Amino acid sequence: MTDRSTLVAYFSHSGNTRVLAHQIHDIADGDVFEIDPVDQYPREYNAVVGQARLELDREFLPELKTKVADMDSYDVMFIGYPNWWGTIPRPVASFLSAYDLSGKTIVPFCTHEGSGLGRSEADIQGLCPRSTVPEGLAIRGSRVHDADELVRLWLRERGWHSNPVPPGTHGSENHSNVVEI
């Protein structure tokens, strides 16, 4: 479907969600936007897990470095994230809370290591009650580099037609539609 204006927005801590976002972009086209918090998360696993838990418990909304200039121009937004504590990381909550997304279709996708989408779809719907949130895609982070065909199938089942991108490129060679604001 190319008649809808599409945004692929994502938050990635380890890089796995970034890979998945660009696989989706290769097919769905549109623009790409990385959700980037002002204060970066620690790299050490236990430190980031602890910080993520604390932020979730306090419903903290971290400040983001940039915003999408014209969110109204998008009809469909793919929203990507690692599954942290069974849901979206707080930078994604900040991003979704920053806009009126009424009437938009918000398609979740996540990377995980065993917890799937968790309750993230319901939490996104709670933050965006006037949006349509269809069934999302969950890919193990350890398998994201081999997920091209699974992504293609998932998108095809939802009415998205494949762009002519050679398998295995993950869009890493062509980021002409990356939104930098």
Image (tube, helix red, strand yellow):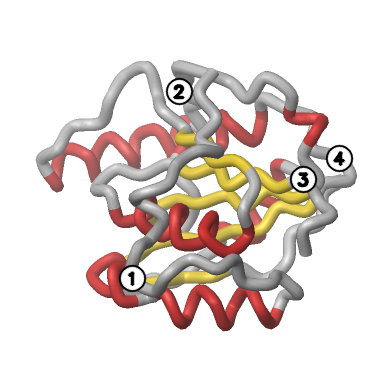
> Circle 1 is placed at which residue position?
168
The quadrant of the picture occupied by the N terminus is: bottom right
> Circle 3 is placed at which residue position?
5
Going 42% across and 70% down the picture, which residue do you hit?
166
**Cβ atoms at labels 3 and 2 below 8 Å apart:** no
Going 44% across and 38% down the picture, which residue do you hit?
57
Rounded to the nearest whole Å, what is the CA distance between mark 2 and mark 1?
34 Å
Quarter residue 119 falls in? bottom right
Q: Amino acid at mark 3?
A: Ser
Front of the two marks 3 and 4: 3
The residue tagged with tag 2: helix, strand or loop?
Answer: loop
The 10 Å Cα crowd at callout 2, few under 14, some 14 to 19, many 20 or more, is some
Q: Is residue 39 above or below residue 159?
A: above
Going 77% across and 39% down the picture, which residue do you hit?
74
Q: Amino acid at mark 2?
A: Pro
7 and 42: which is toward the camera? 7
> Circle 2 is placed at which residue position?
62
The residue tagged with tag 3: helix, strand or loop?
Answer: loop
The 10 Å Cα crowd at callout 3, few under 14, some 14 to 19, many 20 or more, is some
Q: Residue 102: which numbered mark, if any?
A: 4
Residue 84 shows in this picture: no
Q: Amino acid at mark 1?
A: Gly
The 10 Å Cα crowd at callout 4, few under 14, some 14 to 19, many 20 or more, is few
Q: Earlier in the sequence, mark 4 or mark 2?
A: 2
- Where is residue 10 shown, x and y percent of the image? 48, 44
Q: Earlier in the sequence, mark 2 or mark 1?
A: 2
Q: Earlier in the sequence, mark 1 or mark 4?
A: 4
**Cβ atoms at labels 3 and 4 below 8 Å apart:** no
Q: Earlier in the sequence, mark 1 or mark 3?
A: 3
